Image: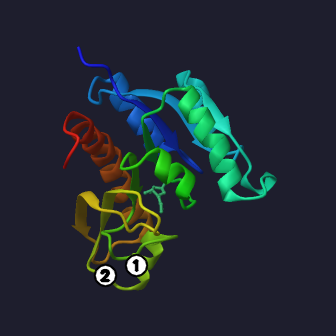
Amino acid sequence: MATKPKIAVFASGNGSNFQAIADAIQAGKLDAELVLAITDRPAAFVVERARRLGIESFSFVPSQYDSKQLYEEMLKEKLFEHGVEWLVLAGYMRLIGPVLLDAFENRIINIHPSVLPAFPGKDAIGQTLAAGAEKAGVTVHYVDAGMDTGSIIAQQSFPIAGRKREAVEAEIHKIEHELYPATLQRLFKHSFI
Ligand code: GAR
């Protein structure tokens, strides 16, 4: 049997996508080893989720470092120590800098709650609704130096006419929790998409 890719999930908040990925691994739907949860917010619920699942987590506070370069050097060392091969961003609300982009070239993936290239950046769902868009959706993409600008791997959308924010958000999360593990599985099985 081929060895499973070792992944680290980066999250800044609730961690429901982290949970979905861990659940998919446990259910045998995603052949990967989730070795580390990384957060830039030590109080984030993702830390508690990791504890419950018995997955190691690592928290850091970016403002305690003089630069992004310095904290990314520290993260790189940590990730290498754990043999991590892929970085999976799941609600990690920071741009990745050159240190990690170079160390994990073409091996950093993100999920974003809009149909990119529309509505990159923060509060994509709010942006979608404020613009009066006909559809909302989810994109899984490679990470480059820009804000949600990397090559698109998978997308799914749905009509939102007349729907309230809560309902749209719930549908987005439902899609994310299926689409992210399934896309990672495809990606790990074929190194191109
Ligand atoms: C998800 O909806 C994800 O797409 C979004 O943050 C949420 C995290 O939820 N990411 C971004 O907006 C990145 N620009 P979770 O913590 O429950 O997984």
Mark 1 — residue? 129
Which disc number belongs to residue 133? 2
Name the residue at the bottom extreme. Answer: 131
Q: Secondary structure at mark 2?
A: loop
Label 2 CB-ligand 1 distance < 8 A: no
Residue plotted at (30% across, 52% down): 175
Left or right, 167 with respect to 94, comes to: left
Q: Is residue 75 above or below residue 67?
A: above
Residue 2: mark: none
- x, y percent for residue 68: 67, 57
Closer to us: 137 or 4? 4
The structure residue drawn at horizontal position 44% and vertical position 71%, both measured from the top left corner, is: 124
Can you say which quadrant of the picture contains the N terminus? top left
Q: Looking at the rendering, which quadrant does residue 69 occupy?
A: bottom right
Toward which corner of the image does residue 160 lie, by quadrant?
bottom left
**Left or right of 1 on screen, residue 150:** right
Residue found 30% across the figure and 65% down from its top: 137
CB under 8 Å between callouts 1 and 2? yes
Vertical order, 175 against 80 (above or below)? below
Res. 40 in view:
no
The figure's colour scheme reads rainbow
Three-letter amino acid code of the residue under disc 2: Ala
- What amino acid is found at the position of numbered circle 1 in the picture? Leu
Residue 21 vs residue 108, the one in the foreground: 108
At label 2, counting other C-alpha atoms closer than 10 Å, the crowd grade (few under 14, some 14-19, many 20 or more) is few
Q: Residues within 10 Å of mark 1 (few under 14, many from 20)?
A: some
Estimate the x, y position of residue 89 in percent, counting from the top left.
Answer: 46, 49
Residue shown at 27% from the left, 61% from the top: 152
Where does the image place residue 127, in percent across and percent down from the top left?
Answer: 44, 78
Nearest to the observer: residue 47 or residue 169: 47
Q: Residue furthest top?
A: 1
Q: Is mark 1 within 8 Å of ligand 1?
A: no
